[in-house]
Amino acid sequence: MPRCSPLVLGLLTAVLVAGCSSAPGEQGEGAATDVPDAAGPSASAAVPALDVEVLAEGLDHPWDVARAPDGALLLDERGGGFTVVLTDGTVRPLDADLDDLFADGETGLMGLTLDPGFAGNRRFYSCQGVEEDGDAEIQVVAWTVDEAWTAATRVADPLLGGIPVNESSGRHGGCRPRFDAEGQLLVGTGDNAVGSYPQDLGTLGGKVLRIDPQTGAPSAGNPFLDAADPLTRLVWSYGHRNVQGIAVRPGSAQVYTVEQGTGRDDEVNLSVAGGNYGYDPDGAPDGPDGAYDESVPMTDPEIPGAVAAVWSSGDPTIATSGAAFLDGAPWGGYDGVLLVGVQKDTGVLGLRLDDDGRLVEQFRVPELEDSYGRVRSPVLGEDGALYLTTDNGDGEDQLLRVTPRG
């Protein structure tokens, strides 16, 4: 994938389009559309230089972060533990019972998000591996936190259970929670590297789920509410490999999901109710049932009605992760851009999409390229700043705050 030079900082987004977009055919097999040589809707605005501030360091695989209305930042680490960063800069652990945490490989304490009514109910949600009586699964747990940010208490334990986990390796555990425009909780899951899961509506692996955040029940409007299997009623979309990112486009009901792919492609998808996103690694037709053939495309064109990706990396892949839209006039030419964390390579990918979700432009953010290592989660705070968690491990990770200069 072509990268932008730091010289673009003072240029217009129109120049970014010409210098950083892939020419037709360069996106790789499975790409939904070629990138046109045309500027996006914000092309007349200058791209701002960005300031990057380290808010916390010495972290180990911080997975997600959320900014509360009082300005405090809540983050978690995959191996276990919540941390709060207070407005005065104090960084301290948040007391919480995680004695049942299943943390192995890619699974552990993963995505988190605050309730839309957090200012009144102090409620947040975590996606985490859990081990009880020798059996492991992934659960969505609801918590409340006291106003002094000293302790979190489980209040729905779990809100949603039964999400499968790969107990031998923790591979492809997902797991990202985000609220949609209707206030329903979306949960992206991984397929556990089990070939049958993505296409099987009777399992919660390899799916995007949509649930009522108070009860954990299937949300009204889910596409399979009439299904006999209660698990199927929770499903919003299927045919996924490992959903690592979910981002709701500001001012719209559009939801985009990000999948870490095989060695042939990563994907960003526009979410569609009931959509089959076409991953089917269940081996060759005459192969063993449940085999995991990762040579297949992320969106198999042989699957009738498979939803094509908005963006696909092609080969080489970059191991896409979390995602967030930038929003607000201070971001200038970056306003409205979808940012995606990059993990195989390092940095942050920018995608400009038109109103219908078609790809207009792709580029890498210069200030974050090869500077902070792997990026797990970009999150836009209510203050308009961008917050990033890195994912390098060995206590070398940071929480970053990124703001447009000027």
Image: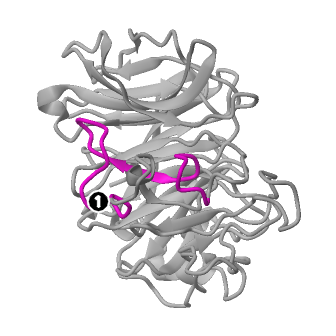
Residue occupying the point 55% across, 51% down: 243
- Closer to the camera, 159 or 122? 159
The front one of 68 and 135 is 135
Q: Quadrant of the C terminus?
A: bottom left
Q: Is residue 368 above or below residue 173?
A: below
The picture quadrant where one finds residue 357 is bottom left
Predominant SS along the magenta part: loop
Q: Is residue 352 left or right of residue 206?
A: left
Stretch of the chain drawn in magenta? 199-225
**Kind of residue indicated by mark 1:** Pro
Residue 164 on image: x %, y % = 58, 37
Residue 203 visible in rendering = yes
The residue most toward the right is 287
Q: How many marks?
A: 1
Q: Which residue carries the number 1 mark? A: 330
Q: Find out whether residue 8 is within the magenta segment.
A: no
**Residue occupying the point 59% across, 56% down:** 200
| Residue 326 image point, x, y percent | 37, 59
